[in-house]
Image (cartoon, rainbow, N blue to C red):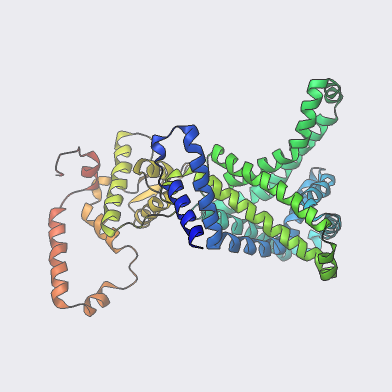
Amino acid sequence: MMIFSSLRERLRHWIWDADLRTLSGARALPFRILRISHLIYRDLADGQLTLRSMSLVYTTLLSLIPLLAISFSVLKGFGMHNRFAPLLLDILSPLGDKSVEITGYIIRFVEHIRADILGSVGLAFLIYTVISMVQKVEQAFNYTWHIKRHRPIMQRFSNYLSVILVGPVLIFSALGIMVSLLASDLMQQTIAIRPFGILLTWLAYLLPYLLIIGAFTFFYILIPNTRVRFHSALVGATIAGIAWKTIGWAFATFLVNSPAYLAIYSTFAILILFMIWLYISWLILLLGASIAFYHQHPEFIRLGGRSPLLSNAYQERLAFNILYLICHNYYQQQALWTLEGLARHLQLPSDIVDGVLAVLERHGFITQSGDEGENGYLPAHPPESVYLKDILMAIRQSGDTWSPGSLDQAMNEVINGLFASLDRAQEQALAGQTLKALAMSEPGRRLE
């Protein structure tokens, strides 16, 4: 046991003590892969990803039929509903022979749902159930991306409806185009030519993987309440997509070679297997989101995946630094600072910067530009009318849940007097100084 612990400690030091800045890209790549793998393992060990995956299984069971019913209705309006069952059968293929039975159950349920019988209240509840599921998925993705703020209600509602209504049409349209191209005479003639035929055969073999990777990439870009780079989403989707297909094959093989388990659970086997596969699928999807996050934010790898704990003094300095950058660009008519840009410039994790931005926005010092996907920040009021002493007081009092009066009564009068004199000294030092003076100041010059 001592030898194993010693080897593990040596391996940990070898992975984390290397300075990647001194290594070339090819030599640093294995260390990055090992570090991300270690962080993913630790995220799994913490239990939050598995807990959220189990929560999504329950949500999926409640929302699956309403979601498929809405998608089926939309596809039926475009004449694409006949392709619904084959796609569902392919997704459930790891369940083996049971996939045909489960697909049949689901399709029969969906086909027998009638909006005219449900009524307006039933239809509203149907849509609410589906939106609740998408919201639950967004919360799980936001957790993997260390995002604490959610989209506004109206933006959330419009985005969810676009995913639910437009998404199925786009997916099935793309599948229909692919099937038509593969069945065309030109494609059949191309297959007859030996080099192209071999390439197209390999492409047909890889097509299920490519479709899954494309769908995962779409989810990773659209769902989190942040700007996800395509390259990072593609990296996470590629690993998650290959893992999903591979584990699906292993799961189907296990079921074929383990008939005793099906005999033990008897008629409950279908539901149990369906729930297990849902859990595995959600867990793989969330792990891919974590990989995409660490790929886009290498500063978390440098910090060992943990956000640093900042002192109160440093948080005050960080808040003034952020205000300076935002107002400086505002006066210089330069591009607005975004959360990602500020985090990269300050070399801090995005959730640390986002927490300070939330405090400044809550107290009315900054506001978001409202541009879709940009989330640029600018002053909420003219900087010449905002005083630095008010900013400092707001930052220091953020998070207080006690009223100052009750807290003062519980303190010693000597201590209260000491801090009252400190507050007066700070007010005198910052007297008359505005946010505009801070933004327009130059290094080495005293604020006026």
Residue 205 in the image, given as x and y percentages of width and height: 77, 36
Q: Residue furthest bottom?
A: 410
Residue 416 in the image, given as x and y percentages of width and height: 17, 73
Q: Is residue 363 left or right of residue 48?
A: left
Residue name at image x 42 percent, y 49 percent: 350
Q: Is residue 132 visible?
A: yes
Q: In the image, is residue 204 above or below residue 415? A: above
Q: Nearer the viewer, residue 428 or 117?
A: 428
Q: In the image, is residue 267 above or below residue 85? A: below
Quadrant location, the C terminus: top left
Q: Nearer the viewer, residue 56 or 130?
A: 56
Q: Nearer the viewer, residue 351 or 83?
A: 351
Residue 74 in the image, given as x and y percentages of width and height: 76, 48
Q: Is residue 115 left or right of residue 332?
A: right
Residue 284 in the image, given as x and y percentages of width and height: 64, 52
Q: Which quadrant holds residue 239?
A: top right
Q: Which quadrant holds residue 196?
A: top right
Q: Nearer the viewer, residue 31 or 433?
A: 31
Q: Is residue 149 visible?
A: no
State how many labels appear: 0
Residue name at image x 59 percent, y 64 percent: 51
